[in-house]
Image: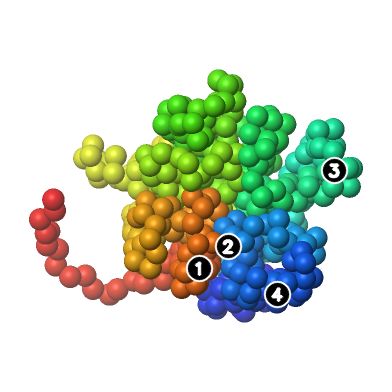
């Protein structure tokens, strides 16, 4: 059995995931350190190569030097790192979910598979094949749409239009947010044939493989699993919140939406309101945004998108579970009931642990960056949340941070990409049953 050999080797999920990404990053760093990776044949230094390799492999999108400084070879290396990083995280996340399920009792496992329509634990090859097919289908569709459109509006030629379509299709679906243009996608802020395909790609990529597979297996919403329902509910709510916040706070801001027509304002607000949860593209100047907008975007980047997807953050399901738990506590309910299902208490504890640890990582990083630079705490918190959420948006401070700050962001990007997956899996595998319980005593809360 293929799955049996895999499970036998995966005794420590953290080592597997971390080792795979470190190897990918080091390989990318070596390739980006070659003289022909940058225009002019001069590399800006190993640190910049390491930063960009980490950013691409973790599908983040932050950069210390302008992307236009890369040669065609350097761009292709970035593209390969994005594809391997995005596909790898979906595959590893799905495999580790199967690993964790082996520790669940047979009855619970059968019920879970019947409930969510999960791929059987013996179908690892089919699982990876399905991920590959979805990836190729979405990336290919977006690439074709962009190619046809760019070939008619861009005067750089058919070949460049095709290359740009493929690059941005891959970058969008994998939520990398890396663009071939030095202004990201600002030149297309008023172009619906770029804005909507790109947003469609990273929203789909952010839903997560389990949800996408269930769409194909169960068309009727009444048959969807609790995971799919929570993911879609939370995703829909945040997709509405983000654009509304950007539109309201930036409507008269001359540095962002102020100079645009009404329709272009709505279109730009849609793009910039949806982007923070997943990808790091931008069609307006992030550094010119007002502080309330930046704070809301920081929160969206911290939350992220769906589990087993190409996004980072604590994930929408974690955020939703905490919200449902709070609502149940306010109502005085003993159980946390969601869509006519009762959540196990262990899920709430895991969500709380993930959220609090993530808050600690982001704020520790923000404070450290604030201490070693002259930027505001809002800017450093934004940068830390962007790195941890593997989003890639920035107020423009990344390249100006000292070397220590850039090294810290490298570690945070890696932690944001592999940390939640490995930690949640570790929690699932550590289900200890004590033979005794201590007496109960309640402290004063509040």
Label 1, secondary structure: give it. helix
Q: Which residue is mark 4?
A: 33
- How far apart are the two marked residues, 2 and 3, measured between alpha carbons? 27 Å
Q: Which residue is mark 2?
A: 64
Q: CA distance from mark 3 to mark 1?
A: 34 Å
| Foreground of the two, 359 or 394 | 394
Q: Residue at x 42, y 48 (%)?
A: 298
Q: What colouring does the structure picture have? A: rainbow
- Quadrant location of residue 85? bottom right
CB under 8 Å between discs 4 and 2: no
Q: Gap between marks 3 and 4, in whole Å?
A: 28 Å
Which of pointers 3 and 4 lies earlier in the amino acid sequence?
4
Residue 320, horizontal then vertical, whole percent: 41, 44
Q: Residue 179 in the image: x percent, y percent?
A: 68, 50
Q: Horizontally, is 38 left or right of 312 in the view?
A: right
Q: Is residue 174 above or below residue 43?
A: above
Reading the chain from its start, which is encountered first: label 4 or label 2?
4
In space, the residues marked 4 and 2 are separated at their CA atoms by 14 Å
Neighbor class of circle 4 (other Cα within 10 Å; few <14, some 14-19, many 20+) is many
Of labels 3 and 1, earlier in sequence is: 3
Which is nearer the N-term, disc 1 or disc 2? 2
Going from N to C along the chain, the mark reached first, 2 or 3, is 2
In the shown orientation, is residue 303 left or right of residue 142? left
Rendered view: 384 above or below 21: above
Q: Identify the residue shown where x is 67% and y is 38%.
A: 187
Q: Which mark is residue 156?
A: 3
In the structure shown, which secondary structural element does the residue marked by tag 4 occupy? loop
Q: Residue at x 38, y 42 (%)?
A: 291
Q: Which mark is residue 406?
A: 1
């Amino acid at each position: 059995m293929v799955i049996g050999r895999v499970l036998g080797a995966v005794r420590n999920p953290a080592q597997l995931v971390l080792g795979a990404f470190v190897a990918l990053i080091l390989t990318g760093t070596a390739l980006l350190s070659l003289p022909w990776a940058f225009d002019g044949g001069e590399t800006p230094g190993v640190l910049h190569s390491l930063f960009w390799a980490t950013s691409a492999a973790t599908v983040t999108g932050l950069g210390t030097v302008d992307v236009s400084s890369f040669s065609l070879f350097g761009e292709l290396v970035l593209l390969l790192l994005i594809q391997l990083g995005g596909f790898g995280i979906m595959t590893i996340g799905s495999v580790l979910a199967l690993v964790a399920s082996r520790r669940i009792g047979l009855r619970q496992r059968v019920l879970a598979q019947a409930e969510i329509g999960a791929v059987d634990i013996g179908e690892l090859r089919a699982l990876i094949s399905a991920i590959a097919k979805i990836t190729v289908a979405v990336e290919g569709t977006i690439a074709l749409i962009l190619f046809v459109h760019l070939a008619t509006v861009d005067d750089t030629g058919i070949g460049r239009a095709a290359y740009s379509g493929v690059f941005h299709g891959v970058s969008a679906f994998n939520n990398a947010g890396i663009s071939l243009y030095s202004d990201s996608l600002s030149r297309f802020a008023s172009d619906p044939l770029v804005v909507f395909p790109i947003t469609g790609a990273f929203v789909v990529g952010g839903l997560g493989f389990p949800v996408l597979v269930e769409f194909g297996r169960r068309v009727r919403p009444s048959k969807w699993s609790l995971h799919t329902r929570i993911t879609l509910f939370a995703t829909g709510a945040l997709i509405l919140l983000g654009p509304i916040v950007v539109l309201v706070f930036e409507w008269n801001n001359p540095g962002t939406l102020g100079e645009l027509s009404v329709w272009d304002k709505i279109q730009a607000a849609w793009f910039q309101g949806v982007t923070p949860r997943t990808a790091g593209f931008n069609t307006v100047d992030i550094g010119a945004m007002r502080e309330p907008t930046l704070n809301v975007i920081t929160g969206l980047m911290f939350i992220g998108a769906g589990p087993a997807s190409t996004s980072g953050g604590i994930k929408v399901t974690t955020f939703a579970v905490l919200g449902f738990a709070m609502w149940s506590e306010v109502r005085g309910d003993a159980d946390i009931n969601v869509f006519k299902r009762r959540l196990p208490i262990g899920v709430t504890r895991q969500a709380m642990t993930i959220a609090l640890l993530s808050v600690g990582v982001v704020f520790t990083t923000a404070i450290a960056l604030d201490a070693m630079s002259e930027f505001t705490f809002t800017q450093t918190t934004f940068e830390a949340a962007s790195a941890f959420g593997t989003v890639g948006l920035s107020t423009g401070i990344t390249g100006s941070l000292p070397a220590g700050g850039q090294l810290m962001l490298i570690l945070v990007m890696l932690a944001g990409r592999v940390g939640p997956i490995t930690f949640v899996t570790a929690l699932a595998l550590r289900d200890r049953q004590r033979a005794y319980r201590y007496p109960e005593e309640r402290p004063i809360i509040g």
